[in-house]
Amino acid sequence: MKLKFLGGVQEVGKSATLVETDIKTLLEYGLKIRQTEESSRFPEPFGNFLDVLAVGHCHIDHSGFLPGVFDICSPTVLGTRPTKDLIELLLEDSMKLMEEIPYRLTSYKQLMKNFVTLDYEKPYFSGKTSIKLLDAGHITGSAMIDIRHEKKRLLYTSDFNTTDTMLHNGTSAPKTNDYSALILESTYSERDHPNRKQTEQEFYNKIKEVYEDNGHILVPAFAVDRAQEIINVIRKFDKHIPIYLDGMCNDATDIMFKHKNFLRDPKQFRKFMDSIERVYGFRQRKSVLNEPCVVVTTAGMLTGGPAMYYIPNLNKNSVILFTGYCVEGTNGWTLQNKGTMMIDKKEVKIETPYQYFDFSAHAGKKELIQFAKDLNPEKIFCVHGEKCNEFADELTKEHGFKAVAPKLNEEFKV
Ligand SMILES: [Zn+2]
Ligand SMILES: [Zn+2]
């Protein structure tokens, strides 16, 4: 089995790994959200032919450039049913936001046409290679990708979470100890997350305090999973506080209803999500802030969406509660670091206080190490993180693994 790392190495963004057995499989083909001096937005070329294109989940850093593959060839696409629908939602949204679409529209259509949806744990066979998707616990439909060819076995984690959330059970390492290689996402290789239950309680306490003080609580959230997770957390504590859901979160919620079997407690999800107000369009949006309430809306990093309307219109007792990471340079980042954001191309000072709560859907440092120990593979490749080199060193020196942080275009035989 041969591996070639085409993106997502020593950084988060544009995940892409080529796996060669008797067939050619590309694991994901993402985009980088923001181009930096060191790194382009696009993954490296994979050649001119693929048998299979497998995708772990819908996030743009994993799926954003999948259509680009179809400018070149036309492989079978493997992912779960929710991932297919969510990719459609997120790619169509990302096409609207791009000044220039970096692939042909017919390629996007071909991608959706070539999609073969797989249930978790059910193998797909091509030649002498078998490919399985395993529940990754990260977001709805998210999967780790397991590839087996003769005696060689690879696990690619994509993004994963081992901690239970309101919507998903945390995942764990497969029980068999016969893995030749593990490609391990390393987003939080440097730090542990705070206790989840405690974070939920503190988050709700803050909401209650501001609500009783007649303020608005604005929660910028990623449309898929985070927005719904936050609502489920609030409803666990409080059945009555008014909650509004606006923006692409509504479309994502409908897709989650459709694939309710991918949720931990579909009945409770339905009950909680039916107890809130959904906001569609500007006319309805204008009346939302008439009274104290919680507004959950896109964009999670304040890069656009209805949040741009709400923020300048919050009353003086209000608060903005971030529930996810904001990439440097985004409005969410400038607000937290300089107290300003760009609204209608003007830099505006924001007086509303903000607070950050760690509702991450990734394994923290402790969990990453435990996962590696449980799987006990012959070799570990650390990807999808800012500190992959340091983490690979630590896994090698302190935990006895053979771990490396691959460089761009580097090839390995396992
Ligand atoms: Zn993700
Ligand atoms: Zn990711």
Image: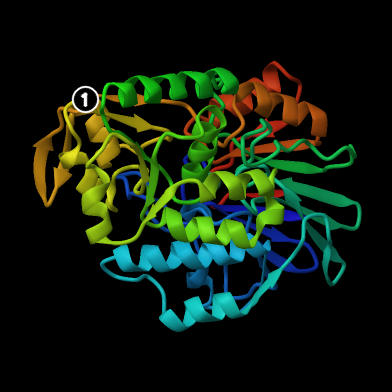
Q: Is residue 249 above or below residue 398?
A: below
| Residue at the image position 49 percent from the left and 42 percent from the top | 226
Can residue 302 be seen by looking at this rendering?
Answer: yes
| Secondary structure found at label 1 | loop
Rendering colour mode: rainbow
Position of the N terminus, as image quadrant, is bottom right
Residue 400 image offset from top left, x and y in percent: 76, 21
Instruction: Work out which residue is located at the far bottom of the displayed protein and give it.
Output: 106
Q: Nearer the viewer, residue 335 or 392?
A: 335
Can residue 329 be seen by looking at this rendering?
Answer: no
Instruction: Work out which residue is located at the far front of the displayed protein and give it.
Output: 240
Residue 251 image offset from top left, x and y in percent: 46, 61
Q: Residues within 10 Å of mark 1 (few under 14, many from 20)?
A: some
Left or right: where 29 falls relative to 168? left
Left or right: where 116 falls relative to 48? right
Residue 91 image offset from top left, x and y in percent: 45, 65
Residue labelled with disc 1:
317
- Whether label 1 lies within 8 Å of ligand 1 gets the answer no
What's under tag 1, amino acid-wise? Asn
Residue 164 image offset from top left, x and y in percent: 67, 32
| Residue at the image position 65 percent from the left and 21 percent from the top | 366
